[in-house]
Image (tube, helix red, strand yellow):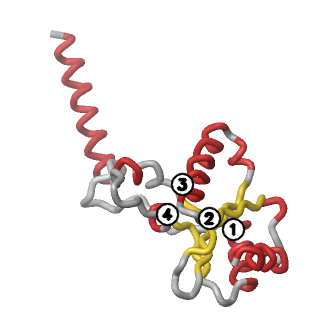
Amino acid sequence: MKLVSVVLVLLACALIALFVLKKRGLLGGAGGPWPFYAKRPLSQPEQVLYHRLVKALPEHIVLAQVQVSRVLGVKKGFSFHEWNNRINRLSYDFVVCGKDSTVLAAIELDDKSHESTARAETDKRKERATSAANVQLIRWHVKSLPDQAAIQAAFAKQH
């Protein structure tokens, strides 16, 4: 009998806790407030590079934080889902396009996080996919951001 009482008390406590959590919106229910806030999509070094790219390449379109799958397509005759799944969660830090939206280059800004084994594998996959599509991938390190002249020189050689 004692065990039944303990179980009932625990069950009552659990129900009260669920009620309180739901009331406070902590259970992620669609009816309550959602736990989101607006954040900056670009880190501080990415903001610096973005403004340098825009200034250095005024005749181009500079896009930030672009999904690789928005830039690379899967050739006909290949399984779209199989190949798209290899890139669908990857993104480029920047994509530089001509005024007609033709992709000229993708840019990656590397920081300490790129030194991990998992990140290195992701970078290799992104590089392989980008190269297969004949899109230039430019890598710059966050500790040595290019100035306007270096950016223009990188694009004068290729474009």
Q: Are marks 1 and 4 in contact (CB under 8 Å)?
A: no
Residue at (20, 11) in percent of width and height: 2
Classify 10 Å Cα crowding around label 2: few (below 14), some (14-19), many (20 and above). many
* Amino acid identity at mark 2: Asp
N-terminal of the two: label 2 or label 1? 1
User: To which residue does mark 4 refer?
Assistant: 67
Measured Cα–Cα span from mark 1 to mark 3: 23 Å
Question: Mark 2, mark 1: which one is toward the viewer?
Answer: 2
Q: Could you tell me which secondary element the residue under label 4 belongs to?
A: strand
Percent coordinates x, y for residue 112 in the rendering: 74, 48
Measured Cα–Cα span from mark 1 to mark 4: 16 Å
Q: Are marks 2 and 1 in contact (CB under 8 Å)?
A: yes
Percent coordinates x, y for residue 131 in the rendering: 59, 57
Between residue 35 and residue 107, name the one nearer to us: 107
User: To which residue does mark 3 refer?
Assistant: 129
Classify 10 Å Cα crowding around label 4: few (below 14), some (14-19), many (20 and above). some
Q: Could you tell me which secondary element the residue under label 2 belongs to?
A: strand
Classify 10 Å Cα crowding around label 1: few (below 14), some (14-19), many (20 and above). some
* Amino acid identity at mark 1: Glu
Classify 10 Å Cα crowding around label 3: few (below 14), some (14-19), many (20 and above). some
Residue at (57, 53) in percent of width and height: 126
* Amino acid identity at mark 3: Ala
Residue at (73, 53) in percent of width and height: 111
Measured Cα–Cα span from mark 2 to mark 1: 8 Å
User: To which residue does mark 1 refer?
Assistant: 46
Measured Cα–Cα span from mark 2 to mark 4: 9 Å
Up the image or down, 109 lies above or below 19; here it is: below
The quadrant of the picture occupied by the C terminus is: bottom right
Up the image or down, 64 lies above or below 51; here it is: above
Q: Could you tell me which secondary element the residue under label 3 belongs to?
A: helix
